[in-house]
Image: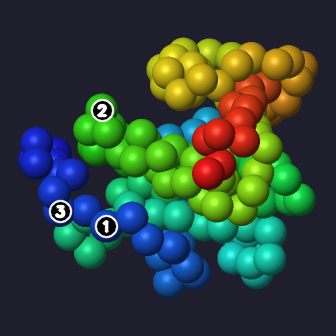
Amino acid sequence: MIAPVNILENITVRPVSESDLDEIMLIEGACFHSPWTRQNFLEEFKNSDLSIPLGIEYEKKIIAYAFIWILLDECHLANIAVHPDYRRMGLAKLLIDKIITIARARGCAKIMLEVRKSNREAIELYAQYGFLKVGVRKNYYNDGFLRSEDAILMDLIITKEDKG
């Protein structure tokens, strides 16, 4: 199903939980060559002192999500995905805006992430927010069959002015 143009008027950004896991797994499988496993997500839900799971709900279904980790003064964007039928509607931007708000509220100095070298759309989106390339993790993503891909490491520095 393709979403209507006015989707942003009818969505809710909210915490996700284990009860949303089936929908999250469908999105994860549709979005990634080497998706997180059900167990990976269950560990995120159990680790509530570190992990913050967010989702976007539309018509009582999760259509996008992000998992972040807050550790001391750093925020790590561990996973973000938008269902393919709902892309290019501003949902990833909504999640990133929420992540930045949470990071500022928690006193984080920066937000860090890894992104596949081939994921140009995501790299461009992060750059629009001011994320800078700070390194490369060689062969970080392994898709099996001896295929691997580098991860681009990106950081967004949150200045003291931004935190207030």
- Residue 44 position within the rendered picture, expressed as x and y whole percent measured from the top left: 73, 69
Q: Circle 3: is it few (<14), some (14-19), or many (20+) Cα within 10 Å? A: few
**Can you give x and y, in whole percent of width and height, for residue 40 in the image?**
74, 64
Residue in the image at 86% along x and 59% along y: 71
Residue type at tag 1: Thr
Neighbour tally class for label 1: few under 14, some 14-19, many 20 plus, Cα within 10 Å: some
Q: Pointers 2 and 1 in contact (CB under 8 A)?
A: no
Q: Nearer the viewer, residue 151 or 144?
A: 151
Residue in the image at 10% along x and 42% along y: 5
Question: Label 1 belongs to which residue?
Answer: 12
Mark 2 vs mark 1: which is more N-terminal? 1
Q: Secondary structure at mark 3?
A: helix
Which of discs 2 and 3 lies nearer the camera? The answer is 3
Q: Check contact, mark 2 vs mark 3: CB within 8 A.
A: no
The residue labelled by disc 2 is: 88
Vertical relation: 91 (above or below) 143: below
Which residue in the structure is indicated by mark 3? 10
Q: Amino acid at mark 3?
A: Asn
Q: Amino acid at mark 2?
A: Arg
Q: Is residue 36 visible?
A: no
When asked about the image quadrant of residue 103, the answer is bottom right
Q: CA distance from mark 2 to mark 3?
A: 16 Å
Q: Residue 142 vs residue 23: left or right?
A: right
Left or right relative to 52: residue 119: left
- Neighbor class of circle 2 (other Cα within 10 Å; few <14, some 14-19, many 20+) is few
Looking at the image, how many numbered discs can be counted on the residues? 3
* SS state under label 1: strand
The answer to whether 137 appears left or right of 126 in the picture is right
The front one of 35 and 163 is 163
Q: Nearer the viewer, residue 45 or 90?
A: 90
